């Protein structure tokens, strides 16, 4: 990842699709904020277009997608496609939720940088982001 030119890493947390279960996304958003990141939470039921537009307008470094609906193989690649179309190829894209291992590999091949499953410690996600932007 490239070096961030501001003091704080900006993270967008979004819930794409019709999934309304947002407790995990809110827990991660708070943990990231408490760790010193600037966090923008878009709320539930976001379309890929809404997420990509928010990422562009907020000039974020990281896009975190929380998905429990099973639509990850449709929604995540679309978000990545839209991010790239608007020149945000450098955005770190993370996915959290219930993702089967074979789908996690396919998501990574599509451009997702990391997939975090249920029970992942917040510290692990924080470290992953910090490591991506250090050096």
Image: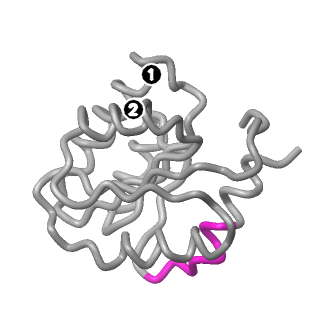
- Circle 1: element type: helix
Q: Does the segment drawn in magenta span residue 11?
A: no
- Measured in 3D between alpha carbons, the distance from the residue under mark 1 to the one under mark 2, in whole angstroms, is 6 Å
- The x, y position of residue 85, in whole percent, is 39, 16
On the rendered structure, is 14 left or right of 50? Answer: right
> At x 26% / y 72%, what residue is drawn?
22
On the rendered structure, is 128 left or right of 106? Answer: right
In this view, the residue farthest toward the left is 18
44 in relation to 33, above or below = above
> At x 65% / y 67%, what residue is drawn?
126
121 in relation to 63, above or below = below
Q: Write down the residue under mark 1.
A: 84
Which residues, given as a range, are shown in magenta? 119-126
- The x, y position of residue 72, in whole percent, is 26, 50
> At x 38% / y 74%, what residue is drawn?
26
- Circle 2: element type: helix
Q: Does the segment drawn in magenta span residue 122?
A: yes
Screen quadrant of the C terminus: top right
- The x, y position of residue 106, in whole percent, is 39, 42
Q: Relative to the observer, which residue lies in front, 36 or 110? A: 36
- The x, y position of residue 99, in whole percent, is 33, 62
Q: Is disc 1 in contact with disc 2, using a CB cutoff of under 8 Å?
A: yes
Checking the image for residue 80, the label placed there is 2
- Dominant SS in magenta: helix
> At x 44% / y 21%, what residue is drawn?
84
On the rendered structure, is 76 left or right of 134? Answer: left
């Amino acid at each position: 990842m490239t070096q961030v030119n501001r003091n704080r890493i900006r993270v967008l947390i979004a819930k794409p699709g019709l999934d309304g279960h947002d407790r995990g996304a809110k827990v991660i958003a708070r943990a990231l904020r408490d760790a010193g990141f600037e966090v923008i939470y878009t709320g539930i039921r976001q379309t890929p277009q809404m997420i990509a537009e928010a990422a562009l307008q907020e000039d974020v470094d990281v896009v975190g997608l929380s998905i429990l609906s099973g639509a990850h193989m449709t929604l995540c690649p679309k978000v990545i496609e839209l991010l790239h179309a608007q020149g945000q190829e450098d955005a770190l894209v993370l996915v959290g939720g219930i993702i089967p291992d074979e789908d996690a590999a396919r998501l990574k091949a599509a451009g997702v940088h990391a997939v975090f499953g249920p029970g992942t410690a917040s510290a692990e996600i924080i470290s992953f982001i910090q490591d991506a932007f250090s050096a």
